[in-house]
Image (spheres, rainbow, N blue to C red):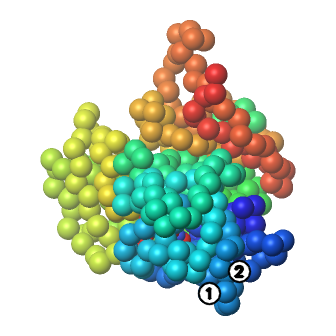
Amino acid sequence: MAMALRLARNGLFTTDPNPRVGCVIAGDGRIFGAGWHEKAGDAHAEIVALRDAGGPVRGQAAYVTLEPCGHHGRTPPCTDALIEAGIERVVIAVLDPNPRVNGGGQAQLQAAGVTVETGLMASEAEELNAGYMTRMRKGRPWVRVKSAISLDGRSALPNGRSQWISSEASRRDVQRWRARSSAILTGIGTVLADDPRMDARVEEAVRQPLKVIADSQWRTPPQSRILAGPGAVIIAGDDSLPASAVFDSPNVRCLRLPARNGRVELPALLRSLAKMEINEVQVEAGAVLCGALLKESLVDEILIYQAPVLLGDGGPGPFALGPLESMAERTHLTMLETTHFGHDLRVRLKTETRH
Ligand code: AOF
Ligand code: ZN
């Protein structure tokens, strides 16, 4: 299963909107075939592994990081292929929460007399597809907020300048997190202040993330760099205001959403993104948007690059949460890992608390 997971990770930048899945066919102390799902529309991991085996695999076991599908999607059911090949035992890391599968693949295998075991390395398999799993279960994408801060906790100067706080190594790492994301979400404030491109610049082939701008008042300038370059753009604004016609280009779509107090409703925005099959969203935005997402419990993961610099007083932190009155109001997070990138410290956290 560890090998199947390693193979699944090869699809990190390409399988979207499908999950990353790996499969190893093994038995009698040897490996017969192995493979991973590369992109939507192409063969699933199980089929790639069976093809890789090339010969008889009757009586062997298949280790799959996700429950084999039993339905006709863009490709035929993997359960049928495994049964026809005479696979005797299927070990599954996690069940597929897709309502079209959801235990049905497991049931089909069992009905055909195949032994099925589930749960081996389940947490690793869950984490690899946190976006897909969250979309299927909650009807919203997995939301990761990325931020660069100084040692004194600021993410910009009082005048809004923030280029650059983190090191080049950190910024290269950010590109990899972008590349695995289905969408990058930013706010109009960041577009106006930084004119970012928000595409994924890595060496490997990637499916470019969708670029999403929370822009309630439809203020995105038509010359913004985010509108050009690879990847489609969604401008999400207030449906009670007229959207400017300059956005009408094939690459740019206006998404009209309900708004409250002049800001688009974030749960509605995330629901719309899930309907577009967006699994993982990386938020690269200012304190107001990041703070609002956090306050509405819409953040799952936080990725902070902390640089050994001091930015002085008055600048914002990564999350505008307003002044708290008592320590009881503080937000608790769960630390997942810390790493060094150049001179910076990278901290990854989950908002879900374990205590
Ligand atoms: C598997 N093995 O490797 C993957 C699975 O439209 P399709 O044919 O690409 O099917 C997509 C669905 O299949 C996807 O939503 C998920 O439920 C499942 N993904 N299943 O057995 C795989 N990638
Ligand atoms: Zn399948």
- Which residue is drawn at the image coordinates 75% and 43% (left, top)? 337
Classed neighbour count for the residue bearing mark 1: other residues with Cα under 10 Å, few (<14), some (14–19), many (≥20)? few
Classed neighbour count for the residue bearing mark 2: other residues with Cα under 10 Å, few (<14), some (14–19), many (≥20)? many
Q: Specify the quadrant of the image occupied by residue 59.
A: bottom right
**Given the current orientation, which residue lies at the most extreme top position?**
326
Q: Is residue 30 above or below residue 106?
A: below
Q: In the image, what residue type sits under mark 2?
A: Gly
Q: Nearer the viewer, residue 354 or 47?
A: 47
Task: Give the mark nearer the N terminus: 1 vs 2.
Answer: 2
Image position, residue 29 (x, y; %): 84, 71
Which residue bears the numbered disc 1? Answer: 51
Quarter of the image containing the N terminus? bottom right
Rounded to the nearest whole Å, what is the CA distance between mark 1 and mark 2?
8 Å
Image position, residue 316 (x, y; %): 57, 34
Q: Is residue 27 above or below residue 195?
A: below
* Residue 60 can be seen in this image: yes
**Given the current orientation, which residue lies at the most extreme front position?**
113
Image position, residue 305 (x, y; %): 71, 46
Image position, residue 248 (x, y; %): 24, 72
Q: Secondary structure at mark 2?
A: strand
Q: In the image, what residue type sits under mark 1?
A: Arg
Q: Specify the quadrant of the image occupied by residue 169.
A: bottom right
Which residue bears the numbered disc 2? Answer: 33
Q: Nearer the viewer, residue 28 or 25?
A: 28
Quarter of the image containing the C terminus? top right
Q: Secondary structure at mark 1?
A: helix
Could you tell whether 107 is left or right of 46 in the image? left
Q: Are marks 1 and 2 in contact (CB under 8 Å)?
A: yes
- Which residue is drawn at the image coordinates 61% and 25% (left, top)? 332
Q: Nearer the viewer, residue 167 or 133?
A: 133
Q: Nearer the viewer, residue 343 or 280?
A: 280
